[in-house]
Image (tube, rainbow, N blue to C red):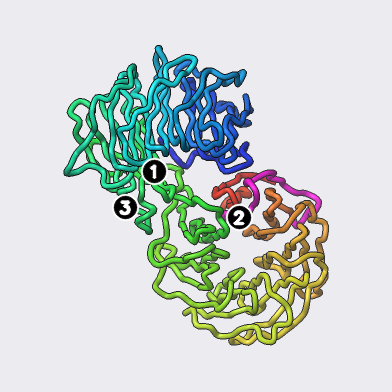
Amino acid sequence: MRDLENPSIATEYVGHKAQATVARYSPSGYYMASGDANGNVRIWDTVNEEHILKNECRPISGKISDIAWDCESKRLIAVGEGKESFGHAFLFDTLSSVGEITGHSKMINSVSIRQQRPFRAVTASDDMTVSFFTGVPFKFQKNIRDHTRFVHAVQFSPNGDFFVSAGADGKMFLYDGKTGDKIEELVSEQDGHKGSIFAVSWSPDSTQILSSSSDYTAKIWDVNTKRIVNTFQIDSAVNTVDNQQVGNLWVVDYLITTSLSGEISYLDKNSGKVSRQVDGHAKAITALAVSKKDNTLFTGSYDGRVYGWKFGEEDNTTKARRIAGDGHSNQITAINASSDAEEFFSVAMDDTLRQGSAEEFTFSDKAISTNCVPRSLAISKDKIKVVATDETVLIYDEKLERIGSLENVDFKPSVADISSDGKTVFVGGQDNKVRMYQLDNGKLTASGELDKNLGNITCLAVHPELNLIAVGDSVGKIFVYDIESKDAVIQSWVFHTSRITALDWSDCGTYLVSGSIDTHIYIWNRDKPSRKIAIKNAHVDAVNSVRFLHNTTELNVVSVGQDAAVRVWEGKF
């Protein structure tokens, strides 16, 4: 749930156990009805932070496609996929039935309830029909067969006089809201939609309709003249297919359309242009880096996208900017930024290392092959890059020329780090050991092992000043080793219950932050090892990475997770 004025203010509901597919506010604003891919509908409180569950049911056996409330916030209709039924009408408090949703032979895509008495309802289906219902209780009256392909959306006007349908045939039809009789088709031969229409929304005064289509446009139609008032071309995504417009919203003066990529576009009705865009990850975020100079965030996700975030800019809002240029084609496994904040580097499962400008948010044309899947990326102050792959460890200089690699590897590397002076490389393996190497002109010479961990080594963090290194493993344990004596000086940080995914030291070197797939984040105090700050359930499913923000008086950390969210946490010891 986002604030329309400041979209970076957002809250998340995590009650569903399956993919959430639809959410609808009640007209009162106090409740939300949300559905998921397993056919569950949850009705929950929107006012309190806990989002207390009011009720839950499973009205149909398959995915919920749409939900509609009546104007009294008492009755709902949920529709979607099913076996015996494709929709159900029920009371929100007792869940008792208030009618039957029949008349369709295939999945129902959309439902709308007239917001005045006498109640009416309409549904749109893959069987190319629109069904019209009277109520309450809701009773099937007739099927409307004006569309020639799937019908994607139906919507009653706020005043109840009309409803509109839109479909994959690129057509929109206007109907009488009380009788369901067709008034006419909304058609424009010259500038009508050239593709499927996925969503429609009415203006608050019921005089205009906003439509969103797969032809990368959103249009405003005037109901009285049956003509198009404005056309908005949406073309910001890197892949043109991602520019398909699949959803929209018209609330007061806000006109919003959403792209297949997940990008939200604010439309200016007066100028006919996109006034603002809110972009971000739509898949699990798998990598995170924070620039030490200005706290610019770089994030990479499961689908290969990389974004930059200028933290705290423009009235304390933070916007995601997609990194332009030829990027990665597969999951990002690691990102890091140079100490001068001029460049960032990323590695991904497309077996490449790429360089980008941290100031211009663009990838360079240069892509370096790693020959196999890279697992981690570390950078020294003099821009020596160390990449751990499934087979070896690769060393690159400032110009991304390979200057060395780990030879005769008799273990499987999982992660690597490098000291800030670029003289020592640490390699964690899947045999529970960390091996130390001295680096000289690209040549790695073994200098010792750290072997107290009980699980596969999953992450490393070299202390910024002292001869210490923090080591996290697959069983949730964190050991801090003295590099010279190779002894574990801290062995009590064992509160994570599963694999450690990230470690990072604060600028002062006193605090260490850790994240895990157990969904928790801990901040540890090196001077007082028994003290800690716990951030429980920080992300749904898993915390994939966590980093300290720099140049702050408090222990502010940023984290990313499996839920595709970027979160900033404020705290003090």
Residue 171 x %, y %? 28, 38
Element carrying mark 2: strand
Residue at mark 2 = 548
State how far apart marks 2 and 1 are (Cα). Answer: 37 Å
- The dot on residue 333 is none
Residue 535 lies in the magenta stretch:
yes
Viewer-proximal residue among 221 and 398? 221
Badge 1, how many Cα within 10 Å: few under 14, some, many 20+?
many
In the picture of the structure, the residue carrying the numbered disc 1 is: 246
How many dots with numbers? 3
Q: Is residue 449 magenta?
A: no
Mark 2 or mark 1, earlier in chain? 1
How far apart marks 2 and 3 lie (CA) works out to: 35 Å
Q: Where are the magenta residues, as a range?
A: 525-551
Rendering coords of residue 106 (x, y %): 46, 37
- Left or right: residue 475 compared with residue 516: right
Which residue in the structure is indicated by mark 3? Answer: 235
Q: Position of residue 259 (x, y in %)?
A: 39, 47
Is 321 located above or below residue 571 in the figure?
below
> Marks 3 and 1: which is nearer the front?
1
On the picture, is 409 further left or further right than 185? right
> Residue at image x 73%, y 62%?
472
**Above or below — where is 418 with respect to 565?**
below
| Viewer can see residue 266 | no
